[in-house]
Amino acid sequence: MKLKPIYIFAMLVVLAITGTLLAMQKNAATDTQKNGKIGGDFTLSGAEGPVSLSDFDGKLKLLFFGYTHCPDVCPLTMANVKVGLKQLPQAMRNQVQTVFVSVDPERDTPDHLSEYVHFFDPNFVGLTGTKEEIDKVVRQYGAFYRIEKGDEKSYTVSHSARVYLIGKDNQIKQYLYHDSTSEEIAAAIKKQLM
């Protein structure tokens, strides 16, 4: 079977984009590690006002960076987290807080974010801030994002797809990913709570 040049070109573009994103994620994590540890407290804006990660002290935190107009990675991740949590007994679920940080402050207002995360689970929290505030938190966690040019309303955002499992001691315990299954998510949470 002979491939047409357009298919070969498309495959090369996909490979180049994937390679670039992986390199950006590795570089972001490496830069953060050089400057100190990854993670820590931060404060951004939620629908009810300022929210800090330390507001959830005593709980495990699942932290994810994304945006509400994301066509695939974010909804898949949020759905897998929701299903993973549902596999746990209520007593365990009560010890976990999911935090979704938007890297698209132009479109993701606190109210819009709240609607988005509550579609998946009413206990999820959506946070945003100014570009500078978000950039600081993204660097702090060794994450990355890049706005892909488009028109004002339909642009996309390439972003890292890690879910940070943060312990009750506020230290990162494990990295999960957008394609981690609900069973893997539930098992990672159980391991920290046992």
Image (cartoon, rainbow, N blue to C red):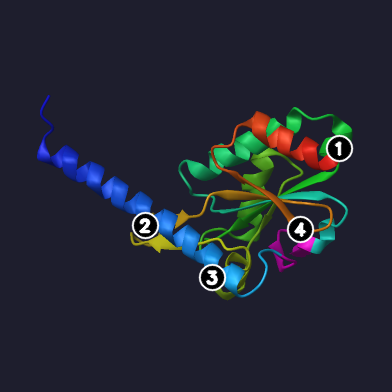
Which badge, 1 or 3, comes first in the chain's sequence? 3
| Sequence-first tag of 4 and 1 | 4
Callout 4, which amino acid? Gln
3D distance between C-alphas at marks 3 and 4: 18 Å
- From the viewer's side, name the closer residue of 31 and 138: 31
In terms of sequence position, does the residue under pointer 2 or pointer 1 come before the other?
Answer: 2
- Say whether marks 3 and 4 touch (CB < 8 Å): no
Disc 1 to disc 3, C-alpha distance:
33 Å
10 Å neighbourhood of mark 1: few (<14), some, or many (≥20)? Answer: few
The reply, left or right, for residue 89 in relation to residue 30 is right
| Residue on which disc 1 sits | 194
**Disc number for residue 31:** 3
Picture mark count: 4
Question: Depth-wise, is mark 2 or mark 3 nearer the camera?
Answer: 3
Q: Circle 2 — which element?
A: helix
Q: Position of residue 107 (x, y in %)?
A: 51, 59
Residue 105 visible in this rendered orientation of the protein: no
Residue range (magenta): 40-53
* Residue placed under numbered mark 4 in the picture: 171
Considering the numbered disc 3 on the image, is that residue within a helix, a strand or a loop? helix
Q: Which element type, helix, strand or loop, lies under badge 4?
A: loop
Looking at the rendered structure, the kind of residue marked 2 is Thr
Residue at (61% x, 41% y) in the render: 78
Do labels 2 and 3 touch, CB within 8 Å? no
Dot 3, crowdedness within 10 Å: few (<14), some or many (≥20)? some
User: Does the CB distance between marks 2 and 1 fall below 8 Å?
Assistant: no
